[in-house]
Amino acid sequence: MQRFRLIFGITAVLVLGTGLLIAEEKEGKKERAKKSGGLSPILRKLNLSEEQTQQVRDIHAKHSKRINELRKQLGEEIRAEQKEIDGVLTEEQRGKAKRLLGQMKGKLKGKKRPPEE
């Protein structure tokens, strides 16, 4: 039984951590997109022509609505899973998971992206 609880506790931490990672990455992407005109770092390094740049932006615009819908669905599914797992954990395990997530979030904030060329 103790092993079962440990496995669920670890799973909860991983699932909750994934939700935080997605949220933080989303915010970081928004900021980078503003600075780069909406192109990914890889595309910016390809020295695209103006025509190619516009084509890439058009393609992105065509798919972005569906991608955003899927991201929203993924977030909802992750939250539903987190809620179910939370229902399995004891109060003590939920507290420990919360502390572990806080530590993980702190470590993520300390990481920096490699410089872009």
Image (cartoon, helix red, strand yellow):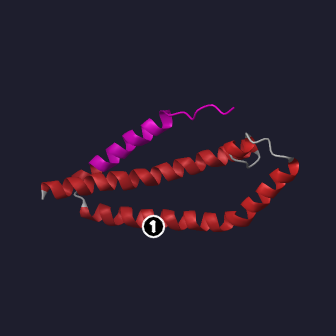
> For the stretch drawn in magenta, what is the main secondary structure?
helix
Residue 116 magenta-highlighted: yes
- Image point (22%, 57%), residue name: 90
**Mark 1 = which residue?**
77
- Image point (82%, 52%), residue name: 52
Find the magenta span and give its range: 96-117
- Image point (62%, 47%), residue name: 29
Q: Is residue 36 left or right of residue 89?
A: right
Which residue is at the front of the view, 67 or 104?
Answer: 67
Q: Is residue 27 left or right of residue 96?
A: right
Q: Position of residue 62 (x, y in %)?
A: 74, 66
- Image point (63%, 31%), residue name: 115
Residue furthest right as drawn: 50
Q: Position of residue 50 (x, y in %)?
A: 87, 48
Decide: is 52 above or below 109: below
Task: Please rate how many residues cluster around mark 1, counting C-alpha atoms within 10 Å: few if below 14, some from 14 to 19, many from 20.
Answer: few
Q: Is residue 39 left or right of residue 99?
A: right
Which residue is at the front of the view, 14 or 109?
Answer: 14
Mark 1: secondary structure: helix
Decide: is 78 above or below 28: below
Residue 72 magenta-highlighted: no
Q: Position of residue 79 (x, y in %)?
A: 43, 63
State the count of labels: 1
Which residue is at the front of the view, 16 or 113?
Answer: 113
Q: Quadrant of the N terminus?
A: bottom left
Q: Position of residue 13 (x, y in %)?
A: 33, 51
Under mark 1, the amino acid is Glu
Decide: is 61 above or below 18: below
